[in-house]
Amino acid sequence: MKLMKQNIMSIKKKLLRFFFMLILLLGILNYYSFYHAKLSNERYNQIIDKIVVLNELSNLIYQNDLYLENYLYTYSSDLLLKYNETTQKIKNQIVKIKPTVTGSEAAKVIFKNISNMTQTYISHSNAAIGLKGVDNEKGYFTYFMQSKKVSGYTQNYIKQLINLELSESAEVYKVLSENNKRTQFISGVSIIIAMILSFVFVLWFSKSITKPIEKLVKSAQKISEGDFEIDPIIVESNDEIEILANTFNVMKEDIHDLILEIKGKIELEKNLNIQKMQNLEMKNMLKEIQLSALQSQMNPHFLFNTLNIISKTALLNDGEKTCDLIEALSDILRYNLGKIDKPVMIKDEIEIIQQYFYIQKSRFRDRVAYEIEVEKGTENFLIPILTIQPLVENAFIHGIEGNIQGGKIEIKIYREENHLMVCVIDDGVGMKEEVIKRILDDSERTENENHKGHTTGIGLKNIMKRLRIFYGVEDVFHIQSIENKGTTILLKLPIKRETEGRDV
Amino acid sequence: MMKFISIIIFLFTAIILFHMVWITRNLNIEKTKNIFSKEELDIEKSPHYVLISHEYDNPYWKIVKEGAEKACEESGVIIEYWGPPVADMNTYMEYIDTAIAAKVDGILMYVLNDQILTPYINNAVNNDIPVITVDTDAPDSNRNAYIGTNNYEAGVIAAKEMVRITGGKGNIGIITGDLRASNQILRIEGFQSVIKNYPNMKVVDIKASGVKKIGVIRAVTQMIEDHSSLNALYCTSALDGIGAGEVIVKKNRKDIQVVAFDDLPQTLNYIDEGIIHAAIVQKPYKMGYDGVMMMNEIMKNQTVPKVVDTGVTLIKKENVKEYIEKNRKEE
């Protein structure tokens, strides 16, 4: 999955770029408007300027006329000063006006005339003043009148020039006006377009950010609800959002994997715990069993009865039998008192069963018959200690002791595919349905059964439980019973490497 | 998407920039208008003449102006065209004074009345401004030259034609533009110098039309009404002939023979239609053109003839069409 592309452009850059362009555009628009206004203004000013300076000249000449006239009447030196000042101003004004006459040739010609006439006017005025000074009354008056005349013509021409400038300016006004209109139009349109563009861009841009974020939010929500089956989020905007989406996808996958892993581990641990629990249970049970076994491995009743028989036999002076009986008892006791969780071979268990039968035969003589069939090859199989023995004892109690006629006990051990089958069959009184049920119901604890007649206190339930733990399967213990007909207890023991002997 | 927007913005900026440049150029262009010359003249250095006409809008004088303009164009001279809206002696005096005050390089002028204007002409000459009189002379002044029609002679020619068409019998009414005008006076004098030799030819009335057409119509109408025996009209200025023609058409007096002056289009039409018999045609264009050329020579201190007679043509029905054609080609 790609996390970084080469040509990534961060959101910041995008925004900057956009704003830069927008500001640039607006700046240009602004400057354009400003520049155009400035130019227009300048042109307007130019036009007005022309008129203004011409007007000023006209005013100066008019003033000068007054000064001259008044001076010639009053001979005041003050007025002479003012006259000279104004005359100079007039000359300066002509200089000032000259560069503003930029229009047609007609205008320039008129200005030339004005300029020359102004000179004529000034020379006539000065002449008048001069002649007045030397008291040439007639002379100065002539010049004075001439000066007035020329001043009149000059004013006329100034007016003409003003008119001409105005009418020429009208052209310029028109152009300016059109320009202004066009500029306004363009500015207006530009601004509208700029606004529309900005609007569109902002919409698009914000969408490009919010849409992926929405997707992310939705996906995040789904993930928070535990649904990892969402599609990866695809964003191609070349910016941080894309990175975000990509990393989100990666994280989602990783988290998903981790969760699965953890789940797996939890499962494992659970199993482990179950195992541990089972082990603990087993150990507990074993301990319990050991305890009760230890307690009950030595069933006093069986001891009493057997000792009874031994004493009776001893009384009868049957020393060999007595010896045999004592040996059998001691074998049984030794076997029973052995470690309870140690597996033994089938043949060992059978041997002890045979010792048991020997003792019982001594008591019951013909009332008990037994048969032991062990398939060849199975003798060395391992089974938990004291699993068949108590079954036999059980069969004995229910099959033989309760029956006046006695009964028969069969033990069949054979191999069936992957299982070792151990059958203990008696033809005694059988077991009631509820009894069978109670035994098979694993939930009840090992109860204190009536163990009268047993060598051990180990009940069927105990055997069943131990077998289940030992073999790790449930289906090991079967009871079939018909009342007054008999009982068959069937052990179905799976053959595993550990239960087999060293060499099979 | 970004790219698209960028392109639009770029285009926009380009348009605006282009527009800015365009405006700047537009606003900075000064439209140059010339009065008479087509090329830029250096106002300071070029000779500067003034043409003072009889009346500003007078079509005859417009032709003089044309001739003068052409000469100016060819010789790099600036010329101003002045003229009162209505013929006014004071205005001519003012014009001369103005020209002197403006220190022009030369004055070409119409002389309304030579006696009155001679002092002014002399004043100009005293101020080192050469003066050439045009169309009408002030022969006693210090003017440098006269260019125009010999008005006395023109009157003579007109009279001779009048005698011919009336068969020596005629009651003639004279319509003149301005009784003060020297050229009109001369034309009448010339005319009368011939007529007086014919006992059956008599001038019954002389009226001034004031040069304007309305004045002409009024004068002619009045004259016709006043003199029922009138059978000929001598019109001494351009518009007089046209006015006379109009009245004749309106009053249906095609029996009245008309001798007119100048070649305004309507005059020529009337000749073609037989309403005006003949016209004495001057050469205003030549006056204008040659006048300027003469002034140029004066400026260069060359000698020029004192009097230049531009001559007249007698246009009658026989040659009017040809005359019109020739003029059209020259335009």
Image (tube, rainbow, N blue to C red):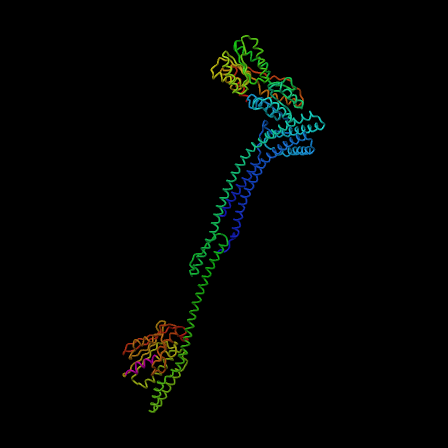
Q: How many marks?
A: 0
The picture quadrant where one finds residue B115 is top right
- In this picture, which residue range is highlighted in magenta? A391-403
The picture quadrant where one finds residue B38 is top right
Dominant SS of magenta comes to helix
Q: Where's residue A225, x and y in %?
A: 42, 61
Is any part of residue A414 visible from this angle?
no
In the displayed structure image, the side of residue A329 where residue B236 appears, left or right: right
Q: Where's residue B310, x and y in %?
A: 60, 17
Q: Is residue B208 magenta?
A: no
In the displayed structure image, the side of residue A324 where residue B59 appears, left or right: right
Q: Is residue A399 magenta?
A: yes
A417 and A156: which one is in front? Answer: A156
- The correct choice, above or below, for A88 with respect to B13 in the image is above
Q: Where's residue A402, x and y in %?
A: 29, 82
Farthest residue toward the top? Answer: B199
- The correct choice, above or below, for A85 with respect to A361 in the image is above
- The correct choice, above or below, for A158 with respect to B116 in the image is below
Q: Quadrant of the C terminus of chain B?
A: top right
In the displayed structure image, the side of residue B26 where residue A363 appears, left or right: left
A407 and A195: which one is in front? Answer: A195
